[in-house]
Amino acid sequence: MEYFPFVKSVQYKGPTSTEPFAFKYYDANRIVLGKPMKDWMPFAMAWWHNLGAAGTDMFGGNTMDKSWGVDKEKDPMGYAKAKVDAGFEFMQKMGIEYYCFHDVDLVPECDDITVMYQRLDEIGDYLLKKQQKTGIKLLWSTANAFGHRRFMNGAGSSNSAEVYCFAAAQIKKALELCVKLGGKGYVFWGGREGYETLLNTDVKFEQENIANLMRCARDYGRKIGFKGDFYIEPKPKEPTKHQYDFDAATAIGFLRQYGLDKDFKMNIEANHATLAGHTFEHELRISAMNGMLGSIDANEGDMLLGWDVDRFPANVYSATFAMLEVIKAGGLTGGFNFDAKNRRASNTYEDMFKAFVLGMDTFALGLLNAEALIKDGRIDKFVEGRYASFKTGIGAKIRDHSATLEDLAAHALEAKVCEDPGSGDEEELQEILNQVMFGKK
Ligand code: XLS
Ligand code: NI
Ligand code: NI
């Protein structure tokens, strides 16, 4: 069965094209700074948004049809397989090479874990065959240990050892699937790993338990041959008020404290960064400078809304800043997962394709702008020059740690008057940015 007969395959048609189902900027094989665009940006489809989310919000039910022609209650596995068929058709037509999932995105959730295991094993075999046929690969998998009511007090942070074990059982199977399907990564997003009030919470106890669950997952993963990266996906709030993985800096500190920093990296989501009061590029920079930039959840927030709206990326400035960080980090070991969904009123199958065209073209523009900025060189040169006083004399001694506090003070006393440190030149740099981005008009 063909689910999306209105499009054969989305192709690059160039910036003057007016076709909706065509890329204007994403040209998969175009060489940018020594490698094809598609290798800079291994795009992935999120199973939950694209094949599952049907437009429901707090005030109303579905606006989209994501049943894939099967009654989920009557035929859960038929539904799960139809979803795979629709998903692979979508990815092939889009030219997307990767996908990501939670366990419960693949098959309908049920209370009995042994039934759940059977369902997941069956769908795992089905996915593997599809992968072999199409060349499409798994970017990362994860376990949904936040949706079911048993996780109302968290999973790794739960007050109940029984719930903790249930989460472990889900993680175990999600890891096995990851290995079976050759996934590059395994994600921990701390869905309900946080708290609402200190009146009922022992923060230290809960964090130790989360770390232990991650350690157990790491040990089991390595035991069954998982060679990829584990990721923490930081988010400051939502669903809990205080999430423990607030931002990259917090998560990195946590990983180091519990000896997990060799096996874990960051999966940075743009909308989570802005919820934490940071920019997307800030979170990428903090991860990269700590050697922990792994993967990206590509989406966009809305400055007027205080929650994770998961819009498809459209902001070219943001994509440009992000791609500058990715390029300077030497690329990602993971990929760009569109953890993004169509707006509730963009409810047709055509809209699914248009959303990916928008997202992929936005990042392609970001990549091309970042390349142009690097080649232009003025901004990099400015930053380099800004720290020139650390190249020689007392500055060099600060850098190689050979000067003591007395030496530094003596230097200041000798100079008597401290010179102005020089303009930060923000406006000129912004002008250069616009000039490089928009060029001749
Ligand atoms: C929710 C998160 C989630 C993770 C995977 O805000 O972004 O979708 O990416 O559990
Ligand atoms: Ni995410
Ligand atoms: Ni999110």
Image: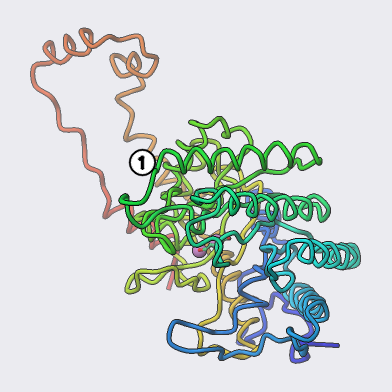
Q: Position of residue 236 (x, y in %)?
A: 40, 55
Residue, far left: 416
Location of residue 84 by image quarter: bottom right
In percent of width and height, residue 8 lies at 79, 84
Examine the image and state in which quarter residue 49 appears. Answer: bottom right
Question: Which of 193/267 is in front?
Answer: 193
Relative side of 437 to 264, left or right: left
Quarter holding ligand 1: bottom right
**Who is closer to the viewer here, 358 or 124?**
124
Which residue is identified by label 1?
Answer: 382
Side (left or right) of 31 relative to 238: right
Nearest the eye: 307 or 285 = 307
Q: Residue at coordinates 11% horizontally, 12% vertically from top-left?
A: 413
Query: Which residue type does callout 1 highlight?
Result: Phe
Q: Secondary structure at mark 1?
A: helix
* Residue under the image location 55 percent in, 36 percent down: 291
Quadrant of the image for the N terminus? bottom right
Q: Quadrant of the C terminus?
A: bottom left
- The residue positioned 67% from the left and 84% from the top of the image is 21
The answer, for residue 4, to whether it is visible in the render is no
